[in-house]
Image (tube, rainbow, N blue to C red):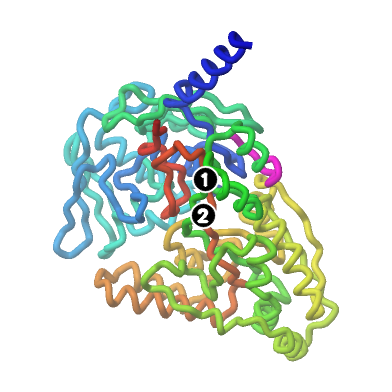
């Protein structure tokens, strides 16, 4: 017994030592590919943003914009050109040098006519990109854009090398502090510390992203220690069990994720604003938050984050009012309506879909629910626009401008709204920009473009000895650069 006790003690002591430089993170969704410049799924950035790939600028944990591959930049007096000074001694993971030519290639590729970049609009204002010398790049814009450093911080704007770009989807090569090691599809992605990194070396030597879709399995994996942290934990109803356990810590924050009941505005009867308004009034947001999110989440009445200083509370415009909903359907001449409701894998969508289906049924609208895997949802709903209703959280920061896109999946693209976004692009004064953003929120809320549900919370669980995980999510990322184990 003494020998067994000694061996057990040695094993327990050895466990933390082995974990000091490695971590396993749980994720609900597996990315469809690993190229943030060629895919729309948030799960891509959750793996590679700030870890494998870097941009000229980057988001900090508090949402501020920091220098990244650009050490600094200068703006012309008229605001139409940005001159970036690049860091020296930076190499891609394949050993090739990073320089101004790579910036020219990356930005021109992103804005090209045949670009597959999911956020191509970020680059629409660029007129030219010039390599002044190996460490200096000049970007000329068609008009002043005070938000350009913000746009360059998105995962879609990371720098890539022409030598490796063809295989980024399965073999990502960036400049970041971690290199890609392997992707076991259906299971995990593993990253390894980049020993040639230009910046401060991360404390972690390896990081594994484990894909666990089922909330019950996520809970079991955390309790068993199969994963060390789950930054976006899908089983909020079990959080009290972690809060009472000193081995864990629960990390509650906010995200940029506006969770919406998206409607296909181009297809009848949803092309009728009265029908869209009727749907909005049929939804009891608090019941949805309680039932699908275990009480976590902030009600929203437009596509804007409540923590943003320019947010306008418009929840009253689409308050729960089933009698109003029935009256609007009658005014629209709509009866015996059945709509297709496409639900992607996240728990908020699957659980929320069942609740919303019941609420719509109460006002006379039936739904045909289809549960889709993420790849199917991206292909049929996001790309194909073949749907009536869907539930999804838009996690990109300050993304109200998506409503101005002609080919966006909910097919709104109102001319007056597009004019607002054009005006916003050319406005640099903070007060003027604030007024435009407030008017834009009111416009889409008044047009009942979508059903605005709640701001997605960031409910994380981690081993109590881990520090450095983001509390809030200013962008869709699991930034590991500051993550470490404590003693």
Q: Where is residue 248 in the image (x, y as percent from the top left)?
A: 53, 42
Residue located at (63% from left, 73% from top): 285
Q: Confirm whether residue 317 shows in the render.
A: yes
Q: Position of residue 347 (x, y in %)?
A: 67, 53
Residue 317, above or below 120: below
- Disc assigned to residue 458: 2
Residue range highlighted in magenta = 210-217
Residue 214 in the magenta stretch? The answer is yes
Disc 1 from disc 2: Cα separation: 7 Å
Relative to 175, is 223 on the left or the right? right
Q: Please report whichever mark, 1 or 2, sits nearer to the chain's N-terminal start.
A: 1
Residue 187, above or below 467: above
Q: Which residue lies furthest to the right in this view?
A: 336
Q: Mark 1 points at which residue?
A: 231
Residue located at (54% from left, 68% from top): 298
Q: Residue furthest top?
A: 3
Asked which quadrant contains residue 465, the reply is top left
Instruction: Give the secondary structure at mark 2.
Output: strand
Q: Where is residue 430 in the image (x, y as percent from the top left)?
A: 27, 72
Q: Position of residue 266 (x, y in %)?
A: 65, 71
Relative to 439, is 132 on the left or the right? left
């Amino acid at each position: 017994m003494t020998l067994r006790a000694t061996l057990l003690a040695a094993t327990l002591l050895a466990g933390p030592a082995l974990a000091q430089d490695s971590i396993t993170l749980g994720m609900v969704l597996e990315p469809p590919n690993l190229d943030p410049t060629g895919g729309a799924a948030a799960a891509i950035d959750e793996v590679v943003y700030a870890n494998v790939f870097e941009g000229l600028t980057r988001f900090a944990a508090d949402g501020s914009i920091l220098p990244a591959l650009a050490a600094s930049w200068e703006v012309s007096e008229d605001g139409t050109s940005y001159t970036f000074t690049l860091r020296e001694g930076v190499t891609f993971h394949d050993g090739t040098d990073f320089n101004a030519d790579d910036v020219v290639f990356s930005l021109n590729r992103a804005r090209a006519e045949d670009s597959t970049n999911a956020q191509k609009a970020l680059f629409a204002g660029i007129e030219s990109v010039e390599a002044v010398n190996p460490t200096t790049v000049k970007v000329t814009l068609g008009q002043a854009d005070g938000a350009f450093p913000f746009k360059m911080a998105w995962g879609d704007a990371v720098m890539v090398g022409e030598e490796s770009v063809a295989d980024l989807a399965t073999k990502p090569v960036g400049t970041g502090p971690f290199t890609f090691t392997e992707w076991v599809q259906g299971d995990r992605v593993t990253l390894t510390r980049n020993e040639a990194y230009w910046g401060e070396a991360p404390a972690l030597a390896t990081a594994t992203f484990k894909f666990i879709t089922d909330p019950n399995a996520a809970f079991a994996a955390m309790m068993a220690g199969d994963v060390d942290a789950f930054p976006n934990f899908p089983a909020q109803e079990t959080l009290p069990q972690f809060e009472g356990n000193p081995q864990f810590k629960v990390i509650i924050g906010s995200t940029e994720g506006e969770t919406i009941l998206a409607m296909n505005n181009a297809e009848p009867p949803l092309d009728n604003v009265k029908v869209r308004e009727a749907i909005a009034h049929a939804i009891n947001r608090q019941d949805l938050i309680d039932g699908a999110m275990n009480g976590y989440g902030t009600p929203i009445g437009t596509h804007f984050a409540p923590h943003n200083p320019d947010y306008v509370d418009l929840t009253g415009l689409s308050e729960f009012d089933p009698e109003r909903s029935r009256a609007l359907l009658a005014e629209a001449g709509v009866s015996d309506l059945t709509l297709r409701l496409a639900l992607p894998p996240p728990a908020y969508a699957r659980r929320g879909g069942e609740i919303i289906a019941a609420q719509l049924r109460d006002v006379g609208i039936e739904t045909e629910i289809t549960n889709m895997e993420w790849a199917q949802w991206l292909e049929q709903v996001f790309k194909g626009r073949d749907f009536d209703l869907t539930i999804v959280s838009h996690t990109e920061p300050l993304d109200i401008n998506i409503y101005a896109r002609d080919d966006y999946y909910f097919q709104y693209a109102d001319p007056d709204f597009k004019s607002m976004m054009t005006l916003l692009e050319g406005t640099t004064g903070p007060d003027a920009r604030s007024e435009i953003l407030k008017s834009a929120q009111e416009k889409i809320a008044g047009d009942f473009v979508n059903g605005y549900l709640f701001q997605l919370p960031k409910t994380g669980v981690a081993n109590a000895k881990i520090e450095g995980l983001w509390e809030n999510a200013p962008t869709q990322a699991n930034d590991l650069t500051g993550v470490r184990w404590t003693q």
